[in-house]
Amino acid sequence: MGDREAPNSDQDDQNGLAEVENGHITDSNSPAGESSSGDDDLGLVNISTGEYDMDLPTTHGYLGKLNPLSGYTLFEDGEVLHNIFALFTDTLVFPGFTLPLVMNDYFENRVFKNFIDEHNNVFVLLCAKSPDKGLIEYGVTMEIFETSLRNNMLHIKAKGRQRCERISSSNVENVAGRIRLVTVKILGDPPIKPPLENTQLLALKSKRKWNLNSFDELKSCVKFRRYHAAQFRFANWVYDLNEVTYYTQIILQALTNYGKDLIPNDPERLSYWFVQNYLLKPLERIRILSAKSTLERLKLEVNYLRLDRLICCYNCRYEITYPSKIFAMSKDGLQSNYVNPGGFVYEIITVSCANNIRLAGDASRQFSWFPGYAWTVIECINCNNHIGWQFTSNNLTPKKFFGLAHTGIRIVSAAPALDKQDPTGHTTYAYDYYGLSDSFN
């Protein structure tokens, strides 16, 4: 997670041909600032838009050519998996998102290679709270879909599949390095059901939709829902505020500036996209991961949307940038996981500008997570903490942006002003803030 100082990844490559420098690799046989011609960068541009092709970072091409593995493994809800391999890193990956890995530790490498050779493609990703507090209780099953062994290093790409919970009473057995044997239970999402589904009057049920698939349908049925809700002691807005489509609409409106093409409309997928991409504290993400349903996740996420946030240096809390400066450089979203040759996994937030930083070292295009861009290490100007990297290009748009590592930053949040209440006593903050009040009049 982001509550640890960024690890120092300076180390020699096993073959002595290159050295790892703060998340990237510099080949001693080529200049650090090696650049390519404009013609070379033409292939990095989306022909239809003329902008940088955001599909490129999602391929993790810096890992080289990998061999595909077949399979799509889903377990039954509530199924218990005994003695399954678990890997823990400083990041979380949610269902539907990719985790790149480099296994350069000899023992980890050998264990995982044997694991894959025996046609075992599924492991569990658990995140370490801290070295002295062990593993968290929740994680995600990961399925390996590409792998390759090169220069005695195992390169892997795995996709998040299902949430799971570690059975706390079970033993955790150390295998090698970051690898453990654990017992977990698969956590399923209950079907999304409208609050009026099992109570709606038959006369209304036959004439009006009760299973709402969109916010527009919710608005069109407001009048008839009020007739139906009148038979119960709760006000009609109680039922409205337990509709998944209501929270989906709030989140979609709040994230409009991040690009509609990147954000899914499906409630379950949206709930995972939000927690993977929105600027959240580690404990906030864990709380969402442990939520028991899509509706519960969306409610938590709407609450977190209300908090003002600031990105600061993890060590000294110097201001680095604002959430308004975050933008997407990858089709995966605003935040993505990348791995360096040293095996460290970084969760990167891309921003258009950063304050109170300084460059450290020369620019290099070696092992760049964003093809066509040269990277330069950035540090906090006050305490020299490793914040992330600056990415630059003479031929691509944008010409410069910053990748902030979760391990180097601290997310500071502040509570909003007190919620306003209507005469009935219920909170109207979400209506007023997101401009939805007219929809329920």
Image (cartoon, rainbow, N blue to C red):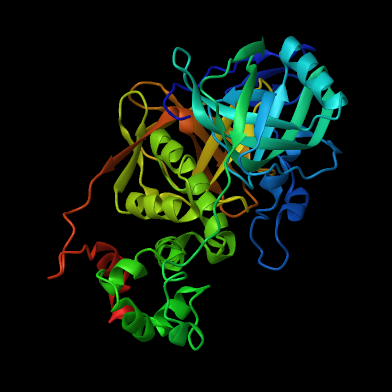
Residue 19, quarter of picture:
top right
In the figure, 238 relative to 360: above or below? Answer: below
Q: Residue at x 23, y 46 (%)?
A: 415
Q: Nearer the viewer, residue 209 or 411?
A: 209
User: Can residue 32 be seen by looking at this rendering?
Assistant: no
Q: Residue 256 in the image: x percent, y percent?
A: 45, 65
Q: Residue at x 47, y 33 (%)?
A: 406
Q: Residue at x 70, y 61 (%)?
A: 46
User: Can residue 199 be seen by looking at this rendering?
Assistant: yes
- In the current view of this chain or complex, which residue is farthest to the left? 423
Q: Residue 212 in the image: x percent, y percent?
A: 50, 74
- In the current view of this chain or complex, which residue is farthest to the front? 202
Q: Residue 370 in the image: x percent, y percent?
A: 65, 42
In the figure, 276 relative to 46: above or below? Answer: above
Q: Residue 428 in the image: x percent, y percent?
A: 23, 66
Q: Nearer the viewer, residue 187 or 281?
A: 187
Q: Along the horizontal axis of the image, is 287 left or right of 235?
A: right
- The quarter in which the C terminus is drawn is bottom left
Residue 226, quarter of picture:
bottom left
In the figure, 36 relative to 14: above or below? Answer: below
In the figure, 46 relative to 170: above or below? Answer: below
